[in-house]
Image (tube, helix red, strand yellow):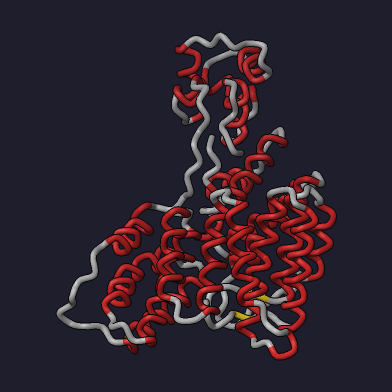
Amino acid sequence: MPEAPGTIGQRLQIARKRRGLSQSELAKAADLSVSTVRKLEQGERTDVRLETAHQLARALGVTTSYLLTEAPTPWRPAVPEDIWRPVMAALGAPTDQLSDPPTPAGVSGALAGGRALFATERYDALGGMLPALIRDARALDDSQTSRRLRYQTMQLATSFLGQVRQYEAADDTAQRALDSATDELDGGAAIVAQCQQMLRRGRLTEVAELATRWADDVEPRMSRATTEELAVWGGLQLRIGAAAVRDNCVAEAADALRMAHIAAVGLGREVISAPDYLRHFGPVTVTHQRAEHAAIQRRPDRVLRLHSAVREWVPAQGGGKSGRCRHLLDVADAHLRLRDEARCVRVLQQVRAEAPQWIVAQRYAQDIMGRVIERRRTLTPEMRELADALGVPL
């Protein structure tokens, strides 16, 4: 549901369904006639008295302004500011000399804990520990070991900020990671992360050019490529493909997927590459991306066929589930496009059960549930509860 519906009738109908009321039940609760409610919802009446709007709003538990306004409701992720704002403040703070200087061993241990929180989608806990980790990593000396720890800290902060939808800050933090990179593979992995944030901001041409340039620089010799080389190069190819398919460059998108597939076959399994430690790459990840391309191209049958091939996906050790959960949103969207609302909702409920903090930050999930609401005459209690949990606006 990208925008709030544009007429009072549409907003009234959606609010009524979200409250689980029939037209007659709403009319009774608002002390109005059923005919009034029906005519408003069907658009036969648009000249609503303020008193009538107030009676309806009171019965529905919404504001009168919501029913009367013509302005769209802006989308905001259901992630409290106190989770991510301290992280942004730490990134912007000056580097201070600490009375108790941190050690590389201490920062490395904290990093491991942060990655574990990211892998389990515990963004509240991760947001709480990242400011101190950022402060300590920046206070380390300029040895190669310390620079690598700063790089990894910035990569973790980039991933966190991206998941809580602070894309501009995530983009800036990815650049900091790139500045701390100690070799070309570190740099390539930082570009993979930066391109992801740029994609979310619609910078398609820039992503394609940046990822292509770096993919050319780090392209491995396949006969003797390392796991890290294949994962970074393959990840860059996926970013090229993601930008191309969104830019309606179908041939370029298909070429990039073929290149990524070559890297994935060379690996033969899902891995988490050492320069990043956060993102999956392998045959299943490439299949997820193929399904995403199909979803963007409105090919729901293909999305479901690809899903059947990776239904029993198991993440690489230490890896998170966000990639799989993002794929499952494509699956939910495919079921809805094929008019199977019940399966769509079951998939959304599955994702919510597996990653409750992740899904509430996904506008895609909110949009899918909004379309379910628009299609159905009535909502089950489970649907209403899910809509509230996802923050679907009334």
Q: Is residue 284 above or below residue 18?
A: below
**Camera-side residue: 297 or 183?**
183
User: Where does the image place residue 239, in percent across and percent down from the top left?
Assistant: 64, 63
User: Where does the image place residue 54, in percent across and percent down from the top left?
Assistant: 45, 18
- Res 102 → quadrant: bottom left
User: Where does the image place residue 361, in percent across and percent down from the top left?
Assistant: 51, 53
Q: Quadrant of the N terminus?
A: top right
Residue appearing at x 59%, y 43% in the figure: 384
Q: Is residue 69 above or below residue 162?
A: above
Q: Quadrant of the C terminus?
A: top right
**Camera-side residue: 343 or 124?**
124
User: Where does the image place residue 66, in percent across and percent down from the top left?
Assistant: 48, 26
- Res 372 → quadrant: top right
Query: In the rendered image, is residue 342 in sight?
Result: no
Q: Residue furthest left?
A: 99
Query: In the rendered image, is residue 101 in sight?
Result: yes
Residue appearing at x 74%, y 56% in the figure: 293
